[in-house]
Amino acid sequence: MEIYKDSSGALVIKGSLTVSHIESAHTKIEPLLDETIQDMVLDLSAVDDIDISGLQLLYAIKKSAESEGAFSIRAISPQVKEHVLLSGFNTILKEGV
């Protein structure tokens, strides 16, 4: 799993957001949130797998970002889009997925 801020300031997540990777993802994301919390943009185009724990992490990021400013998802992989739609998280994330 790779998590970093790109040149535009978006938080890019590459790899899997599944239960076996969530603790590592959270540890990597937490310091980056403080830097980008005012206008949080997520790029999920390189996420190749996600489960309910990954969706919960996305929701937690969204809630944190909205308490300080704005939140949006810039890009989403087909795999993540499918899980978001099947789980009903599209209504929670309120993104055009």
Image: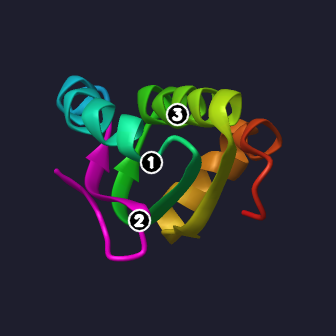
- In percent of width and height, residue 86 lies at 69, 45
- Counting residues from the N terminus, which is met first, the one under dot 2 or under dot 3? 2
**Circle 2 crowding by C-alpha within 10 Å: few under 14, some 14–19, many from 20:** some
Disc 1 and disc 3: Cα gap in Å?
11 Å
Residue at image location 50% in from the left, 57% down from the top: 42
Q: Nearer the viewer, residue 56 or 51?
A: 56
State the image quarter where residue 59 is shown: top right
SS label for mark 1: helix
Position of residue 5 in the picture relative to residue 8 (left or right): left
Kind of residue at badge 3: Ile
Any magenta on residue 60?
Answer: no
Q: Nearer the viewer, mark 1 or mark 3?
A: 1
Residue 16 colored in magenta in the image: yes
Seen at 21% across and 27% down, the residue is 27
Residue 36, disc: 1
Q: Write the start and end of the magenta stretch as one range.
A: 1-18
User: Do tag 2 and tag 3 residues touch (Cβ < 8 Å)?
Assistant: no
- The label number, if any, that marks residue 61 in the structure image: 3
First reached walking from the N terminus: tag 2 or tag 1: 2
What's the residue type where badge 2 is placed? Gly
Determine the secondary structure under disc 2. loop
